[in-house]
Amino acid sequence: ATASPSLANCDGANPATVLHPVVAAPLLEARAVWLDPWLLRWPGVEARGRFHLYHSATGRALAVTGAQVAGADGVLELHVATDAPPPAVAVRFRHVAAGVTLRLASAAEDLRQLHREQLLLVQEDETGRVLRATRLQSPGALDELYAAAANAELGATVTPGRTTIALWAPTARNVALCLYRDGNGLAQSLEPLQRNAQTGVWSTAIAQDLSGGYYTFLVDVNVDGIGLVRNRVTDPYAISLTTDSRRAYIADLNAPELKPAGWDQAAAAARAQQPTDAVIYELHVRD
């Protein structure tokens, strides 16, 4: 079992804690590609032997050539696909080289759970010994499995008497929220986040306007070659960050106190009519 996050995890110099380390072994390349939630392509591999997808909740599955897979929590059988991928899939992944295309027969809700674990695709001989093994590239599956997240409201949203904080982390095992009063002090509270299985969004709503405060996330996720890791991270949807991007800032950008004088009366700049007329620049002022 994995220990629940504690307030102590919100502070300290080390932002990552290994909860379940893997057995020392060379890290496999990620050669296989998910084309959609049910189809996989393994470039350069012929359709011979048997193909299985092994999974482990703590990242301990180990595939060594010539031996049987060890440490997995479960295994799914894959079958060689004899029909061509759907046209849209074929176009999107036209850059993926030829190889065996495999089909997995599982319900979408089972696949969403599967992608929260360590995954190994293995080609085996008739006795179950490993011929080849690879990790997998997952965007093709995640994009379709969590298409409902396209319109999700992410980051910190402040409304009168309420602050909602949401993070898209479909492969996470657990997510918790650290709240701080300022950019340097210790965390004041730790809040659990709830996962929406359809969108992969973790969120919580707090009955308080937390404007002016700060936050980070504690995200438990499988990291290939390391194991199950608890990472303390900031929010990719944060509107502002502290020095060295250590904490995210909570605010409503429409709040009057955040608007320069005359902001609401200032005319918006004219939009460029042609893309070639746009001037794009990036500016940093000491972080």
Image (cartoon, helix red, strand yellow):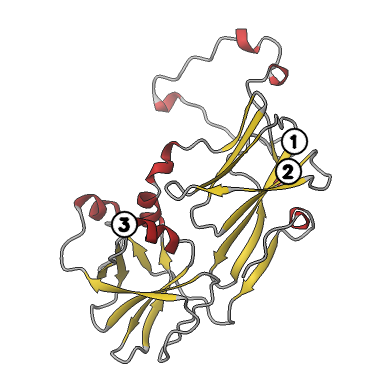
Residue type pointed to by label 2:
Leu
Q: Quadrant of the C terminus?
A: top right
Image location (x, y in percent) of residue 255: 67, 20
- Which of label 3 and label 1 is nearer to you? 1
Q: Secondary structure at mark 1?
A: loop
Does residue 121 lie above or below 173 as drawn?
Answer: below
Q: Is residue 287 visible?
A: no
Q: Are marks 2 and 3 in contact (CB under 8 Å)?
A: no
Local packing at callout 2 (Cα closer than 10 Å; few below 14, some 14-19, many 20+) is many
Q: Quadrant of the N terminus?
A: bottom right
Foreground residue among 250 and 244: 250
Q: Could you tell me which residue is drawn at 16 percent across and 68 percent down?
A: 82
Q: Secondary structure at mark 3?
A: loop
Query: Quick one: label 3 or label 1, which is nearer the N terminus?
Result: 3
Residue type pointed to by label 1:
Gly
Which residue is disc 1 drawn over? 213
Q: Are marks 3 and 1 in contact (CB under 8 Å)?
A: no
Image location (x, y in percent) of residue 135: 43, 71
Which residue is disc 3 drawn over? 36
Does residue 266 lie above or below 75 as drawn?
Answer: above
Local packing at callout 1 (Cα closer than 10 Å; few below 14, some 14-19, many 20+) is some
Foreground residue among 189 and 59: 189
Query: Residue 179 shows which numbered tag?
Result: 2
Q: Secondary structure at mark 2?
A: strand
Residue type pointed to by label 3:
Asp
Q: Are marks 2 and 1 in contact (CB under 8 Å)?
A: yes
